[in-house]
Image: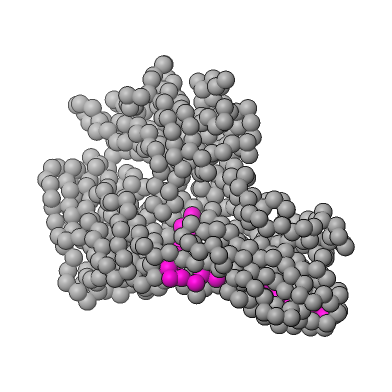
Amino acid sequence: MAPDRTALVGELAFVPSTRGLMSLFHMRRRAGLLGAAAATIVVVGPAAVGASADEYDNFVDFSAPYQFSVLSAPDTGAAKARTLNLSMYSQGPADGKDVVVTLDIKKLAGVADASFPDYCKTAGTVVTCSVGTVPVHQPDTWRPTVTLPVELRGAKNAKPGAKGQLDYVSVAQSNGKFRADAGFTEITVSSGHDLVPGPLPEIVRAEPGDIVDMPVSLTNAGNESVKGVFLRMSGMDGAEFVTRYSNCRYGEANFYGSEATCLFPDVTVEPGETYALAASEKFRVMPAATRAYANYTVGGVVDWPEFSSGSPTDGVPGGGPELRLVRKTSASSKIAKDIDPADNFAGLSIHTSLTTDLAAVGAGVPGAVGTTVRASIGIENLGPGRFTDRSGGETDYSVKVVVPEGVTVTKVPEDCRLSDGKDLGLDQKTPRFPGLEANGRPAYVCKWQGDYFAYPVGSKGLFTFDLRIDKVVPDAKGAIQITSARLDKNAANNRAELVVNPTKPPAGGTGGTTGGAATGPQQPDDAGPELAETGGSSSTPLIAGVAGGLLAVAAGAFVVVRRRKGAGAATA
């Protein structure tokens, strides 16, 4: 039976879940990487209704601004409306079913008036909207899959600076059970300009070497004018500028891309006016690109500190012609700051037909009894495509290795942990390494994060283990398997072997690599993140380490708290 949705509003515990924090992390990280305004995003949940999050096969998130500005009403007539988009998506693997969003508008009284779509019903201060199905989000585009638009305008006699709050909760059904996510947005009455970029296509299909057009425009959706405009553009992950303009400053280009800041100090944009570049900005798709991105941010020069701690004159000026911004529609005139820097960004995704081939890297190491040898195993991107993980770490590129017979692990690499035997995905249901059995031996899982989440062709994520040889077992083998990746179309090389004292080259993956000797007999030291003492044939690890960590996120920066190091050794 469905819970009383009316009673949920304002009573749910606003405690972020692990996945909620990661969603917050990847959205903020994305804003920082793309040069967008450092908008605060609230993703709150889960507040379980009748079951824990692990019992569900979907995870519906809100994606909405923590703060939102509405325009103050003029002396006569109504204020101009602004739309607050309450966006949602399912983390997967299944779509969210029968999603209902309930909103409480009582804290908006005297501050803002709200209007809702036809599929919403109002009873007093409670509004109930039957959203229906919320599909799984698409990481290629970063865009939410369902949006609930709420039209807001400043209430009559509400003065700039007045504040209210819109509370909301979504209830999704899954397998006959219900769960809820809750959030809120602070509403502030404001007066000023609001430069909003024009729409862009969500996905553009192209191939390496092609030229892709990005039309750039801006409209002043505020109620005051602004003099002086900046335009910041970025080409990322395989999209490079074709022309470098004289009135733009360009940063140093690298694998991640390049950024340009262009100034138009003499342009004044009145309320309702639209300006556009005289010609679309052009990007060339670089070799090996699988998913490239192009984006732009617009703002008033007076608002620059809201977008960057640097100077708009940083970088090297282009040697090409002047970039022109021309008026497309006319619409009157005070100048003030941008009332909503969070809506100044637009971007598009460029998809090519290239894929990647992630392969397991095996190892073969010889050694005598009592010696400690080093074995490096891992993952390699064989191409032909490169890629960057824009999920903020939610996408999984990991390798699992089973410890061979006759050896003890005395040192574990950073970013590796002892396997819990289940190794489930984010949904806590899907095995990440299907078919790989440890058969009572210790196993480790190592996560490859690339070069700041970038994975060029030929890049490797190698993890070096110190192994003490307790007895010589010819061809003692431990299986290696990597997680499947979305763009990896060749699963045949996702397995390899770690072989101690091989009589022939290890099979599978990239053919294997040979680790070098560490020293003679050693005691375990600097054991790494998580180690266990298993002793003989025992398959019950005693895990030492912190069960979780705290993820701290700030605008433009993030901190990951490392697991503390454990003690002991793993024996097979």
**Residue 109, horizontal then vertical, whole percent:** 39, 23
Which quarter of the image is occupied by the C terminus?
A: bottom right
**Rendered position, 139 above or below 520:** above
Residue furthest top in the image: 124
* In the image: residue 395, left or right of residue 321: right
Residue furthest right in the image: 536
In the image, the segment drawn in magenta is: 371-391
Residue at x 53%, y 66% (from the top left corner)? 358
Please state which of residues 215 and 138 is positioned toward the viewer in this rendering. 138
**Rendered position, 1 above or below 88:** above
Residue 397 appears in the picture as rendered: yes
For residue 247, which quarter of the picture?
bottom left
For residue 12, which quarter of the picture?
top right
**Residue 149, horizontal then vertical, whole percent:** 34, 34
Residue at x 50%, y 75% (from the top left corner)? 458
**Residue 87, horizontal then vertical, whole percent:** 41, 39
**Residue 255, horizontal then vertical, whole percent:** 42, 71
131 within the magenta span: no
* In the image: residue 481, left or right of residue 250: right
Residue at x 55%, y 22% (from the top left corner)? 2
Residue at x 82%, y 54% (from the top left corner)? 540
**Rendered position, 271 above or below 153:** below
375 within the magenta span: yes
- Please count the marks in the image: 0
Which quarter of the image is occupied by the N terminus?
A: top right
* In the image: residue 314, left or right of residue 178: left
**Rendered position, 256 above or below 303:** below
Residue 260 appears in the picture as rendered: no
Please state which of residues 549 and 58 is positioned toward the viewer in this rendering. 58
